[in-house]
Amino acid sequence: FPVTITGHSVENPVLALDSNGRILLGVSTSAGTIQVSRYLQNGSADASFGFNSSYVFNNSSTSVVTSIGFQSDQKIIVGGYSGTQAG
């Protein structure tokens, strides 16, 4: 899937399928953010989801996505952690 995050590498991809067959892709970025994007069954970006088919979660520390899934009512759950990078 084409994930575009200008100037940042993409790490830790996680995938999930919703009940309509749409694909959710969660990634961590080298900037310390998490991006969740949704694609239609045919692989094209879902323009009805977020801004440019994505939501970006940005905070003041490093964030890493570890899982993505759904509640019984199809609300999206994103798992991960946030903290300060050592080094």
Image: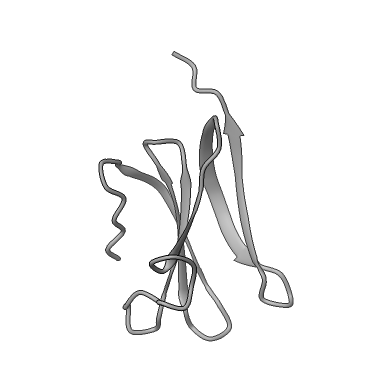
| Left/right of residue 8 with respect to residue 15 in the rendered view | left
Image location of residue 31, percent across then percent down: 39, 36
Q: Is residue 65 above or below residue 55?
A: above
Image location of residue 50, percent across then percent down: 49, 67
Farthest residue toward the right?
72
- Tell me what residue is drawn at x 62 percent, y 50 percent: 79
- Tell me what residue is drawn at x 54 percent, y 30 percent: 61
Name the colour scheme.
one colour
Farthest residue toward the front?
51
- Tell me what residue is drawn at x 55 percent, y 23 percent: 84
Q: Is residue 72 above or below residue 54?
A: below
Q: Is residue 27 above or below residue 17?
A: above
Image location of residue 24, percent across then percent down: 48, 68
Q: Which quadrant would the N terminus be assigned to in this image?
A: bottom left
Displayed quadrant of residue 72: bottom right
Q: Which quadrant would the C terminus be assigned to in this image?
A: top left
| Left/right of residue 11 with respect to residue 61 in the rendered view | left
| Left/right of residue 76 with respect to residue 31 in the rendered view | right
- Tell me what residue is drawn at x 44 percent, y 65 percent: 51
Farthest residue toward the top?
87
Displayed quadrant of residue 3: bottom left
Displayed quadrant of residue 82: top right
How many labels, in total? Answer: 0
